[in-house]
Image (tube, rainbow, N blue to C red):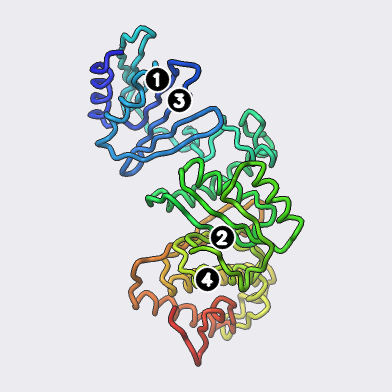
Amino acid sequence: MSESEVKSFFCMITDENTDKIIISKPASKSSEYKKIVIEKKAAFYQISRYTEKQVFHENIVPEQLAETGLALTQAQFQQVNAWTAKQEYTLLISKKGSCTIRKKTICEQQPCQTESSHDRKKEYVLEEGTAIEPLIDMGIFTKEGKVVRSMYDKYRQINRFLEILDDEIGKRQLDHLHVIDFGCGKSYLTFIVYYYLTRIRNIKAEIIGLDLKADVIEKCNEAAKKYGYDGLKFELGNINGFQAPFPVDMVITLHACDTATDYALYNAVRWNASMIFSVPCCQHELNGQISPQSLSLLTRYGIIKERFSALATDAIRGNLLEYCGYKTQLLEFVDFDHTPKNILIRAVRRPITPESVKKKALEEVEALIQEFGFQPAFYKLLGLTEDKKSET
């Protein structure tokens, strides 16, 4: 193979502001990687290396693209395809090492149109074609790594959760992560999060899943052992008063019922966890307390009362997390049970939170409390009463 020709090819496509590169056709059947995909993100390129069963990700800056592409291709692959907004470039390398470069204009006969969101193929964090054992056992993937048609909604929902995690984790240079999953249940998501962190992000993760059902914990530990997930453990215990065995970096709660979510958030704050991802479940607390002073319309109709109470619960949680020093977002999330409860709370600890931000967040919560007679669990756990408000 002519190194200079391959290098010239990558220099050319780098200068053309390439959006995507696919390196394929391994030169040997014994090659570890079957294909490599390089995609342009906001300020970097993401490299995805595909084996038969796994995919490994790495981010590089644009200045590294030509050198990295050369290193990945040389003596390992026989074809490279690259796309810009208007051109497709192809590099073909014969078995003897000779190179052929082709260039094709996209939409040559008519003005190119921006691809619509309906036509664009959705790219998922967990791509088809990879045999992910937990997804196979859940019945979402076949043994070949294909999505079972009837399980496509659940496949999409799991990816949505990982996308929300990846939006934050992708910004960080992490080599290890300590995670607590409160109320893990059968732990479908816990296994997938562990796979995502260790296999896709190459992060050494230690995860503890906590639940109150002994039989569930036993089965989950057996499954973790079966998958070879050495950093994943499950323990029997209550969220309230749980003592973490390590400094907690991230807390996850998926469908922790009613005030269990509040105890999980309180623990996350108490531990100074840098990231919180919480999907609340049933929320009865405020629905049983609501007694508006002047907005009785919101309690006249049962369904409105229920939904308003649930929304108020999450709004209060979001603001209290802001008060505790977190940048907080409430995001749309389609949950696994197809219920209307589709809000995910994503909170990321700020290095410094201005006092004005904390003050406003708390004032808004207390105005809601006063209007509706609420006594939110998270508010009380933080010690925020009228006679005593402790700083967090």
Name the N-terminal-most of marks 4 and 3: 3
Label 2 SS: strand
From where the camera sits, is residue 304 visible?
no
> Closer to the observer: label 2 or label 4?
2
**Amino acid type at mark 3:** Lys
Instruction: Bin the neighbour count of mark 1 within 10 Å (Cα to Cα): few under 14, some 14-19, many 20 and up.
Output: some
- Please name which of the two marks, 4 or 3, marks the residue nearer to the observer: 3
193 relative to 24 in the view: left or right: right
Which part of the image, by quadrant, shows the C terminus? bottom left
Q: What distance separates the C-alpha of mark 2 from that of mark 4?
A: 19 Å
Q: CA distance from mark 1 to mark 3?
A: 10 Å
Please tell me whether mark 4 or mark 1 is closer to you in this view: 1
Residue 279: x %, y % from top left: 58, 60
Q: Of label 1 and label 3, which has the lower sequence position? A: 3
* Residue 230 against residue 364 in the figure, above or below: above
- Mark 2 lies on residue: 180
Q: Position of residue 3 (x, y in %)?
A: 26, 17
Instruction: Give yes or no for contact between labels 2 and 4 (Cβ–Cβ under 8 Å).
Output: no
Disc 2 or 3, which lies upstream in sequence?
3
Amino acid found under the numbered disc labelled 1? Gln
Tell me what residue is drawn at x 63 percent, y 38 percent. Answer: 133
Q: Which mark is residue 35?
A: 3
Give the mark nearer the N terminus: 2 vs 1. Answer: 1
Q: Is residue 252 above or below residue 124?
A: below
Are there few (<14), some (14-19), or many (20+) residues within 10 Å of tag 4?
many
**Which residue corresponds to mark 1?**
76
- Residue 197 against residue 268 in the figure, above or below: above
Q: For numbered disc 4, what is the local secondary structure?
A: helix
Determine which residue is flagged by label 4.
Answer: 317
Q: Would you say residue 161 is visible in this rendering? A: yes
Nearer-N-terminus badge (2/4)? 2
Q: Secondary structure at mark 3?
A: strand
